[in-house]
Every structure is written in C-alpha cells, then in structure tokens.
Amino acid sequence: MSTYIKRVLLMALLIAMTHPVSAGPDGDDDKPAGASQTSDMTMLTAEQRHALGIIVGHPPAAQIPDRIDSLGLVLDTTMLVADVGDMSAVGAAERSTKAEVTRLQGLYGDGAGASLKMLEAAKAEEAKAAAQTRFSLARFNQHWGPLARMSPAERQKLLAAVARGQILLLRADLPGRHSLGSMPDIAQVDVDGIHVSGRVLGVMQQTDETQSVGLLVGVANAPAGLSPGARVPIALMMAKHSGVLLPREALLYDEHGAYVFEQVADKSGPGRTRYARHDVKLLQRQGDGWLVSGVDNDDDVVFEGAGVLWSLQGAGARAADDDDND
C-alpha cells in the first residue's frame, strides 16, 4: 500500500474519531464504521491497524544488572556553603522587613509618628526581600536538589560534616542518558584502585557539560588527596529487579507517568481490536529500550504505532471539549 493511501486512510480515521456518533440507549446504535474511542480506549479494524502500521508483540522477560558504571566529579563544596549562607542572609532580611512593616502599621494606625509614605516604603522593601528569598531558594533547589529534599535536621547534619571536611560530595554522571528509572542503592568510588563506599543522595536537577543525568553522592572519610575537580570512576550498585524489555517507541509519558498501549480482542464485532492504556514503571534503560514492570511477557503490547494511537485519543478528547463548549 502506497504512502499516499496510508495518509488518506489516516485522515479519514481522524475525521471519524473527531465526529463520533452517539450510541442509543442500548449502547450499540449506529456505531461508527471507522474507529470508536473513549478517553482511555481506541478501537480499530484489521484494515485500519494495517494502514496505521500498528505492530504488536510480546516483550521478553529480563533483569536489571546490579552495576552501572559512571564517571564521578568531586564537587567544590564552597559553592554549597555560599548558597546556604545566601539563603540564611536573605531569610534574615525578609524577617527583618516583615517586623518593620508590622511596627510601622501599628504606629500609623495609632497616629504615632509613622506616615503612609514610610509604611509604603517598608512594604516595598518587604516585597523585595521576599523575592530575593524565593530566588535563593530556587537556586539552591537547582544546584543541590537532593539536599533541598532532605528534612531540615538531616540536611543540617550533612552540611556540618561537609564543612568539617568529613564528607565529600561527588557528581556521578551517566553519559548519554537523560533519565533514570530505579535509584541505585549505593555508590562504589574507585580511588587509585581503592574501593570507597558512598551514599547516593538523589538526582541532580542541573546538568553539566556532559548534558547527562547526574546523581549526588556523599563519601565519608575519603582518602587523603581526593579534592575538588578530581574525576574518578564510580560504580552505581542496585538490587536486581525483574521486568520486561520494551522498545522506546512503545513507551509514552504524561503527567501520570509512563504507559503503553495493550491490544485486547473486542467482542462487539468480528475483526475489531481494542487498544487500552496500561501504566508501567520504568526500571532501567537497556540499549535502545527500557526494562519496565507492570506488563507481562505474554501481554500483547503495541511496539510500533503507539504515537498514532495517542494522537487518535487526543483528537477524540479535543472533540469532546469542543462539544462541551457549544
């Protein structure tokens, strides 16, 4: 079948999807001759599946390796100390301006020597201090996201150890990757052949020159001589997880997480097949695909054409929105 004919069939199918025929009281009256769709289900005939290039397969079972090799960089913790100091300073300034506004409001209300101009100037300083607080907090979250997500007591304990030089912070980069499924349990840092254990603190939000996903690793009592700027191999260790391998074309992602389309035979008529959303959990990237959990190796998963199915559901959703606005 030529590419032109495929495009014509696809456009006809989209038109049918965006102008659904309402079912009667028994739910079967005048179903569209093309494809029918709900918010989480698409129904296609054999001809439509062929025209749209839908390919279904059974994902093979596999396991995550318990080791991922990465490259680590020892971070300059003076930047961390500076960011923490900035947050403390702007926080104190904001509290001071709030107190001044409260004081002037009391004086102005009592008519005791505070003018409206003085009160407005104090409120402007308060707004400026609040903006600086938000900026410093956003910068700290971007630079040190795993620390920002800690409890205040845990973060303060770690910062004190870092300031005393008892803990070094490293960034472990996974070149060529921009996402991470399961979080590694521990990190094993190779320092001149000496294996030093580290604690994986979380995923960094800010990328570096490698433009890859990075993990923040804390190493206690590191060997002497390991200083900021040093690059060392890091092995990220994790427990083995079982799952199935899926090609990346099969995976979609939205605000609810990763999912695939599963093919299910439909009993309403011969030759019809339903495609329903099936949520999955990303475990680990493997070559050009992903190891996931949530589907079995005997499930009929859409390997190619998932994007087309997503487009069809999106067209139906937009049509429903338009009808609601009429």
Image (cartoon, rainbow, N blue to C red):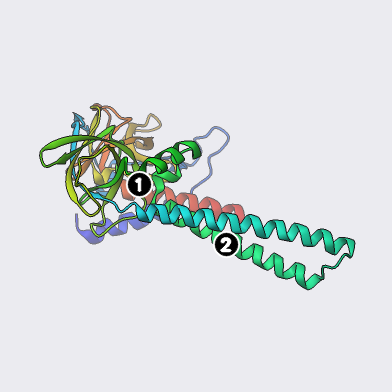
Using a 10 Å C-alpha cutoff, classify the residue at mark 1 as few (fewer than 14 neighbours), some (14 to 19) or many (20 or more): many
Q: Which mark is residue 256?
A: none
**Residue closer to the observer: 276 or 246:** 246
The amino acid marked with disc number 2 is Ala
- Residue 108 position, x and y percent, is 84, 64
The amino acid marked with disc number 1 is Leu
Query: Which of the 4 quarters of the picture holds residue 118?
Result: bottom right
Q: Residue 131 carries which label?
A: 2
Going by the image, does 102 lie left or right of 86? right
Using a 10 Å C-alpha cutoff, classify the residue at mark 2 as few (fewer than 14 neighbours), some (14 to 19) or many (20 or more): some
Q: Which mark is residue 309?
A: 1
Which residue is at the far right? 111
Going by the image, does 285 lie left or right of 12? left
Marks 1/2: CA distance? 45 Å
Q: In this view, does 80 lie above or below 294?
A: below
Query: Which of the 4 quarters of the picture holds residue 217?
Result: top left
Q: In this view, does 301 lie above or below 87?
A: above
**Residue closer to the observer: 241 or 205:** 205
- Residue 326 position, x and y percent, is 62, 57
* Disc 1 element: helix
Q: Which residue is rendered at x = 32% and y = 40% of the image? A: 166
* Disc 2 element: helix
